[in-house]
Image (cartoon, rainbow, N blue to C red):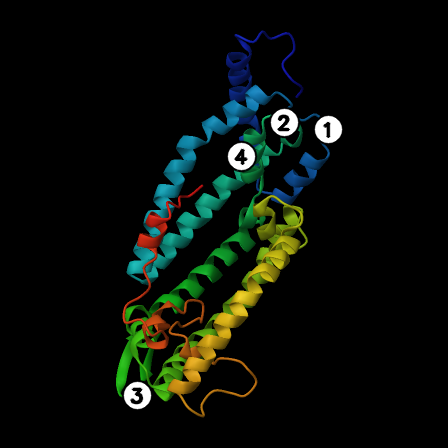
Amino acid sequence: MAALPGSSASCSLAAARLVTAVCLATLLQAARADNYDTYLATLKNVSALITNEAMGVSFIEGLEVPYTTMERVDSSAQWDYATNITEYNENNTNKVANEKAKLEREFGITAKRFDWHNFKNESLKRLFRHVATLGLAALPDDKLENATSLSSKMAAIYGSTKVTVGKKEDLSLEPDLVRMMKEVGDYDKLREVWLAWHNAVGPAVKEYFIPYVTLANEAAAYDGYANLKDAWLSDYETDNMTEIVDKLWEEVSPLYKKLHAFVRMRLKQIYPGRLPEDGTIPAHLLGNMWAQDWSSLYTRLSEEKEPLDISKTIQEQKWNAS
């Protein structure tokens, strides 16, 4: 469908909405077709795309209510499952997730009927790009449901696994193990906590993680990406994200290496003879189950008795967000 011919500025949006209501009803019905692959193939053979941006605005505006409702139901189901991991809540969150994905599929396939790549309104183009990128929703129903099930099983393992450390049994990640990683100062006890968690969760998740990644890569291919990594990188809306990260690392690495050396030196003083000689720091000594946050080490490694508070200095120097 081409742009609406002969429409004035005052009536183009109203006319576009009327036409959109008719054509989208047909398109959404087609998007519900049982044979999804056939429908995708049909779409590729359709040369006439909707070029009228007013119709695009109308389409995007029409998604607000169903999207909001869908997100509310999905968030509620996920919360119920996260706070009460039962078979019923698992089945319910899977059911809701699949319904959400299928609705996103309908919207996404319809969005592909627009020539949004050539829209002049950049904000509208970004919205269309988001809607047209299907993610897991691009998978046929059987694979979609499998991916959803795999995801919920991994979440269940992550959220419900309990371990034994020493004489303490039934320790969960939150709050037990997280607190122990921050507060326990004994080298061997920290190692025991770290190994207990990772040995219990890692192998159990691996069974589901590998097939999940396979399905996620397949879904990314439907969206035109080589793999899930490229699909994720596309969210940054730049073609050279890897180069940007490399450049940023070059800028911060001198400071990071000094920080790493300082932390390692202090830890060698605290745990004499326990750190390896290859320059690395064992992950279990950094106060975080994933070694991604070292802040809990501050008072142990610094000469300061309290964590550094830079708010006063920022205010005195009149710094702001700009």
Which mark is drawn over residue 119?
2
Residue type, numbered disc 4: Leu
Q: Earlier in the sequence, mark 1 or mark 2?
A: 1
Disc 4: CA contacts within 10 A as few (<14), some (14-19) or many (>=20)? some
Three-letter residue code for mark 3: Gly
Q: Is residue 166 above or below residue 246?
A: below
| In this picture, residue 206 sits left or right of residue 76 | right
Around disc 3, counting alpha carbons within 10 Å, would you say few (fewer than 14), some (14 to 19), or many (20 or more)? Answer: few
Quickly name the residue at label 4.
127
Residue 248 spot, x, y in % from top left: 59, 57
Sequence order check: which comes first, mark 1 or mark 3? Answer: 1
Measured in 3D between alpha carbons, the distance from the residue under mark 3 to the one under mark 4, in whole angstroms, is: 53 Å
- What kind of residue is marked 2? Phe
Number of marks in the image? Answer: 4
Question: Which residue corresponds to the image point at 58% horizontal and 50% vertical from the top-left?
Answer: 139
Picture quadrant of residue 44: top right
Disc 1/disc 3 C-alpha distance (Å): 67 Å
